[in-house]
Image (spheres, helix red, strand yellow):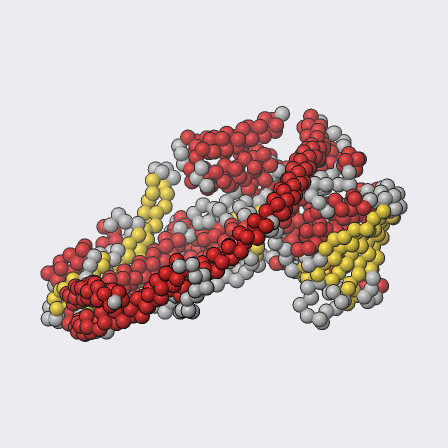
Amino acid sequence: MKTSKLSIRLLWYITPLVILPLLLLGGFTLTNVTSSTQKQAKLIVSRFVEQQQQKMFNYMEIYQSTTKLLSTSPVLSDFLSLPENETQEKTQRLGALMDVFASYSEAYPDIISINLVNEHGQSHAFYASNLNRAPQSYPFFAQVRQSNLRQQQFMQASHNGGTQLYFVQQIYGVDFNLNRPQREGYIIVQVAPSIISSSILEAPYDNTLNLLVSASGEVLFSSDSHFNQSFLSAEEMAQINGLADKGKLDSLVLPSIDNLRRMTYSAQLSGGYYYISTIPKTILYQSGKAISLTTALIVILSVITLPILIFIVVRNLLLTPIELLGEASHRVGDGDLSVALPAHDDDEVGILFDDFNHMIKQIRDFQGELEDYKLHLEEKVENRTRALEEMNRQLEVAIAEAEQASQLKSRFLANMSHEIRTPLTAIMGFTEQILHYPNATNSALHLDTILRNSRHLLELINNILDLSKIEAEKLAVEQDPIELLHLLKDVESIIAPMAEQKQLDFTVHYALPLPQQLFSDETRLKQILLNIATNAVKFTETGSIQINARYRSDTARFEFEVKDSGIGMSQGEMSRVFKPFEQADSTTTRRFGGTGLGLCISKNLAQLLGGDVSVESAQGVGSCFNISVAANHPTQDFAWIDDEGQLSHDHVVSAQQLDQTQLEAEILLAEDNPDNQELLTLLLGAWGLKPDIASNGAQAVEMALVNDYDLILMDMQMPVMGGLEATEMLRHAAYDGPIIALTANVMKHDIDTYLAAGCDATLAKPIDREKLGAVLLNYLQLEDDKNSQWNSLLQSEKYLQISRNYVEKLPDQLIQLEQLFGDQEWESLRALAHSLKGSAGCFGFNNIHSAAGDLETCLREDNPTKWEYAMLTLTQAIRYTLEQEHA
């Protein structure tokens, strides 16, 4: 009886709640379907026109930029600057100018002709891809002369029924007496409008008519060729102009086209041209009628069937389960805990049934647990007490570990303070000695000491950075081919002199056969071997040091053993030796120094290379470190070293052979800083290389398109055009030679940007001589020279003169910095700081290099709170350098 009443009430509620909204929704849909269809059509047409407008704008922007770049060509400036009476020289420069025109025409196939004309329209230089003669005049030239715009564009109908696109750029020279610009002529570039023609032919709907019309009403382009070079009336143009101002689709009749009412969208382009897309109104809204009929039918069927279906579904899904749940609840209320609801579908009602059954089961379980809890309460209290005691013990252990960590931190800071102060003391002391006595006989020895301690300090900082990267899991390793003999020879060349200085025997033993190559990270593997081998030399007073190399075919790993007869370690010391910031004990730290990072980093690096580092040692006997790394051979077919004679092969090229090497390579150096130009020219001269110089990216593109260079050194930040844009333009123009980026920005995202733009490699500023040689070796097949050749080069009078010239320019640059900061010219200030960062580092002024880098970073990050401090730091660094140089 209850179910029947609930069903009737449910039916009374469902009927109005379902039918009334359906009727309202159906009426609203029928009345608004036409409006929705119109809005959709307007959106499609407007987006289509905006896309075509943007496509044409981008196309014109490319050739406007190309025309502007052509007008700034140094070759064009040289041609115009020569007097008319210099006939022979004029002819030679005309030939160079025609080569430039031809290179632009090859880079941009749509260029038909390039014409250099004077103020009166007379042609001085004309190039046409179809070998036509220069035109006698241009219909629009009078308008060009009357206009003050430097750059203009024109669309001109041709006699063969087509339309040509012209870009005009005024050319100005400088009158050095009056210091004002003087117009010397025009560059006129004729372009085949291929993109415009294809855009006109595209259409969002069938029967769409697209037009490109001039301000005077002339049809320049049309998707229907019958309307080309026809004219729209002034009244029609006024209506089209009004549509362009509104920026929306509207109904319009164009008698010059036909007498149909059309839905038209108009957009105004630069130069007074209009892009028009139009479609007959009857065709555009034809689909709306079918949608209206379909909507009405759906609404009628829904009003009839939906309430019935909802009532049947709700009754089966809700009313029947509610009745079962009510009956079960009454039984539980009467104390019957054996009740169980039947299994139901996997929905909310089924979950409710499962929860009800689970609740009954929990009640039964809780009753049993309550009885058990009463019986075993004392036992549970005792167990809880033991758990609290265990927790207290763990807390005490955690406190002890925290205190130990604090002690380790204090010990690490003390070690770091000692390790950093030791080389800094030598660097500062010997630097002051050289400043006070620059002509002392042992100055070279002092400089060598400063360099050695600087490298030690750099190695210390690199170890700390490596450890932080390893702990953050940010250290990446490579898998490049490595020559095994070359690797071990390098290690031997470093360790052998150290062992000889302490009168220790040093040998390298090869367990033949050995693969000639392994695929791993050469830098990291060499770092592991040098860390452990130098430790062996440091902790060995007498005896010998031996490195054993072998290959395990079963595990496909290389194993290197480093044995020494040094002080050795106890079992407890071996358990701590691979932890960061720890050595054997405090006595070891005081006696031998060090931070305790080397072995920790070596073990982590070996694990990243697919292996590990382990140690066996005995106090007073010596230690044996076993290093294993994965070979990572891509195939099982690889070459072996199975003869003792192969081990004696010398992989090092003699310095005498390199001194006699003279190279013949054409190199382009794109660098805006004159000091860096002179320095790099001097460095490249060590191999007999004399580069051509370009002071900005535009000159670099110009010279690279005309000449065939074997390699380009490209600075990334230059005036007029930066190195990034120049590289992209050269790659677009099909230059396939190597381009090396010169930059002071060496962050990973910066390097990825340069490589993505088309650079083959990067060189960081200040230029590292070894890395420069490696790049030349890779791309010009050069061999690395000895350090003696570089040292003699850096001590030459030519290099010293370049350095003195750079110092003499610092006062002017200091004035320019302060003026830019006072005028709040932040972008120019950032560019000058970038230039100072690169050039100061090249000449060894590291204080200016670091301060300029900080100022550039603050300006790039838009952090005004740090600008004044960074500016003060840079100016003080320059003043300090000038004071030291004057002293």
Q: In this view, does 668 lie to the left or right of 340?
A: right
Q: Nearer the viewer, residue 789 or 101?
A: 789
Q: Nearer the viewer, residue 160 or 55?
A: 55
* Residue 310 x %, y %: 26, 69
Q: Quadrant of the N terminus?
A: bottom left
Q: In which quarter of the image is residue 458?
A: top right
Q: Which is nearer the eye, 761 or 495?
A: 495
Query: Where is residue 283, by image quadrant?
Result: bottom left
Left or right of residue 827: residue 52: left
What quarter of the picture does the C terminus occupy?
A: top right
Question: Residue 25, percent across and down?
Answer: 19, 64
Q: Is residue 415 left or right of residue 185?
A: right
Residue occupying the point 25% across, 57% down: 269
In this rendering, is residue 437 above or below 632? above
Tell me the residue at 76%/31% (across/down): 441
Residue 258 at x, y percent in the picture = 13, 71
